[in-house]
Amino acid sequence: MKTAVIYHSQTGFTRKYAEWLSEAAGADCFDLAAAKKRSFDGYEAIVFGSWACAGGISKISWFKERAASWPEKTLIVFSTGGSPAESPEIAAFLRNQFSEEERGRIHAFYCPGGFCYEKMSAGSKLMMKMFRKMIGAKKEKTREEEEMLKMISHSYDLTDKKYLEPILALLKEQSAQAQ
Ligand SMILES: Cc1cc2nc3c(=O)[nH]c(=O)nc-3n(C[C@H](O)[C@H](O)[C@H](O)COP(=O)(O)O)c2cc1C
């Protein structure tokens, strides 16, 4: 099944997953800027990877607009984020990105990324500073908030190829069905 992986990445975690996935699935890999300039006719599956930003997925609206004209293709979205894979909020986070109709045709996955303050834009650093200040100022923090505050006060990397296994299994399954 001819597959394209399109990614949008600021600090490199999503790019790393997109490259691992492309290599494992034998797919072509494009960053968003290149993807915007080309057609995906001829591809049977499109994977869009991007990063969680304040509860949303950065540039998901670009993907949704393009996906509207891809009714025949297998459509997969993965989001990276700073939260660990076990975080109880992940299921709701993924669910909230899509309407019921979209959920019926777009498969969504989460791959933990991390935080890389060294590569973050000035705007993102400022947003994170404000977020840390807001949580830090809370008088009664939940245990989750205490843990998150500790985690996001420095850079860390949670990436692991194992988080791509469900996506690879789905691509394999869809490819078998197409034959
Ligand atoms: C401004 C900002 C907002 C973020 N919001 C979230 C969020 O809502 N949930 C989450 O899990 N991670 C959040 N993150 C963490 C990023 O999603 C994470 O660092 C991601 O892996 C970055 O991917 P990239 O390296 O491909 O740019 C945020 C990061 C920044 C800079």
Image: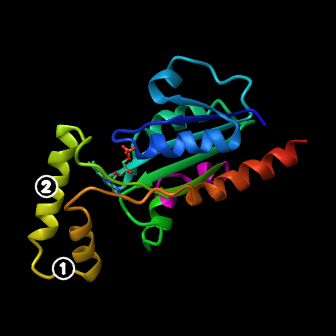
Q: Quadrant of residue 68?
A: top right
Q: Which mark is residue 130?
A: 2
Instruction: Quickly name the residue at label 1.
Output: 141
Q: Is 23 placed left or right of 150 in the picture? A: right
Please report whichever mark, 1 or 2, sits nearer to the chain's N-terminal start. 2
Quick one: which residue is furthest to the right in this view? 179
Q: Residue at x 65, y 59 (%)?
A: 166
Occupied quadrant, residue 26: top right
Task: State yes or no: Cβ of the residue under disc 1 lies below 8 Å from any atom of ligand 1.
Answer: no
Where in the figure is residue 177, as x and y percent of width and height? 86, 48
> Along the line of sight, which residue is nearer the eye, 76 or 27?
27
> What kind of element bears circle 1?
loop
- Which corner quadrant holds the N terminus? top right
Q: Nearer the viewer, residue 58 or 170?
A: 170
- Report the side of 22 relative to 113 (left or right): right
Q: Examine the structure image and report whether residue 104 is included in the region drawn in magenta.
A: yes
> In the image, what residue occupies the spot 22% across and 38% down?
121
Residue 87 in picture, x, y percent from top left: 42, 71
Measured in 3D between alpha carbons, the distance from the residue under mark 1 to the one under mark 2, in whole angstroms, is: 16 Å
Query: Are dots 1 and 2 in contact, CB under 8 Å?
Result: no
Percent coordinates x, y for residue 106 in the rendering: 63, 48
> Which amino acid does the dot numbered 2 rest on?
Met
Q: Regarding mark 2 in the picture, which secondary structure is present there?
A: helix
Q: Which mark is on residue 115?
A: none
- Percent across and percent down for residue 129 are 14, 54
**Within 10 Å of the Cα at label 2, are there few (<14), some (14-19), or many (20+) other Cα atoms?**
few
Compared with residue 115, is residue 20 higher up or lower down, i.e. above or below? above
Q: Residue at x 67, y 35 (%)?
A: 27
Amino acid type, label 1: Lys
Name the residue rendered at 8%, 70% in the picture: 137
Magenta stretch bounds: 94-105
Quadrant where the C terminus sits is top right
